[in-house]
Amino acid sequence: MSTKIIQHDINLEPFMSKSPDFNRKSILMQTERSFKSEIINIITLTALEKLFHIRISDHFERENFSFLPGQFVMLHLPGCGEVPISISSSVSNKEYIELCIRKVGKVTGMIHRLEPGAIVGIRGPFGTHFPVQKMTGCDVLLIAGGLGIAPLRSPIYWINEHRSKYRDISIMYGARDPDQVLFDYQFEEWKKIYGLKLLTIVQNAGKNWKGRVGLITDLFKEITIDPENTFAIVCGPPVMFKFVCAHLSDVGIPRHRMFVSLERRMHCGMGKCCRCNVGSTFTCLDGPIFDYWTVMNLKEAI
């Protein structure tokens, strides 16, 4: 007697109609799938940085892909390798994600040679995020140094889309020289549309630079901080954290209300390669977003 095998369509299962919860660590530990994606646009920002617009090819996967401000993805270039990159776009943008990539090694160097239409892979998103929901009803101070402005764009978009829930918003941005200032074409838009205060400074002024010159900590002289109702987000070189967070602590902001992005030698995004561990802490799983109290107690974290 022959038995008829009934074909099972997994797409009819109830869970297939729900958005995957990409933010659960238990799921992230098993996230090895790479989403086939296409580079649809490239914006040259500086001699070393480019902004890539990347769209997940499959419509269903693209619509269900979700992330929170501060998370990152692993960008895979077939035949070359992959690198962790913080997401720089709005969480509400379902058409593509934005990745600001600095040319610093073999993989990023090859990525910089790509043109629109190139196919890449995306794994993730991974990691913790900025607790922007907990910041509602308070002032938010966003402080960036150099490439640190890239991961700050996502919370800036979030705050703009929920602007009525926040009080005063201030951005402090410092770069080594004017040629390394990123996203300056958005500065006026942020100030006028987003209703925030933006202060920029460079360490070495060029011939055409008419703005402030000095260290990023010099900008604290131009803002008023309400320590009992302020959250701070700090992104940039780890050496910057000590000086910026020390000043924030001096004015009375608790260290658990300061949040930093710590991307320490991340490689796999799932805690398997152990390259980013500090003691029992894995930057890719327990971070990259930490409150400063946690970071300052992690030996060799910064």
Image (tube, rainbow, N blue to C red):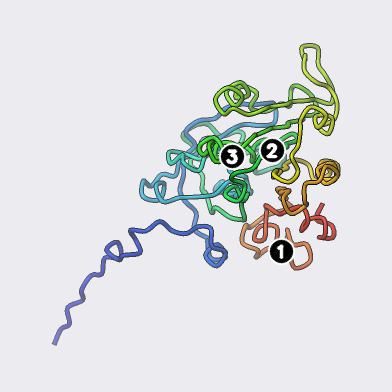
Q: Residue at x 58, y 55 (%)?
A: 126
Q: Amino acid at mark 1?
A: Cys
Q: Which residue is mark 3?
A: 166
Badge 1 element: loop
Would you say the residues marked 2 and 3 are in contact, meaning their CB atoms lie under 8 Å apart?
A: no
Badge 2 element: strand
Q: In this figure, what is the number of numbered marks?
A: 3
Residue 82 seen in render: no
**Residue 140, located in which quarter of the rendered image?**
top right
Q: Position of residue 75 (x, y in %)?
A: 57, 47
Q: Position of residue 31 (x, y in %)?
A: 52, 61
**Residue 235, located in which quarter of the rendered image?**
top right
Q: Position of residue 233 (x, y in %)?
A: 70, 43
Residue 274: assigned label: 1
- Per the model, the C-alpha gap separating discs 3 and 1 is 38 Å
The residue most toward the top is 208
Q: Amino acid at mark 3?
A: Tyr
The residue most toward the left is 1
Quick one: label 1, few (<14), some, or many (20+) residues within 10 Å? some
Q: Residue at x 83, y 46 (%)?
A: 249
Report the mark closest to the observer, 2 or 3.
Answer: 3
- Per the model, the C-alpha gap separating discs 2 and 1 is 30 Å
Would residue 66 be found to the left or right of residue 72 on screen?
Answer: left
For marks 3 and 1 on the same chain, the one whose residue lies earlier in the sequence: 3
Residue 31 seen in render: yes
Would residue 175 be found to the left or right of residue 270 on screen?
Answer: right
Depth order, front residue of 102/187:
187
For marks 2 and 1 on the same chain, the one whose residue lies earlier in the sequence: 2
Quick one: label 3, few (<14), some, or many (20+) residues within 10 Å? some
For marks 2 and 3 on the same chain, the one whose residue lies earlier in the sequence: 2
Q: Which residue is mark 2?
A: 142
Q: Residue at x 73, y 31 (%)?
A: 173
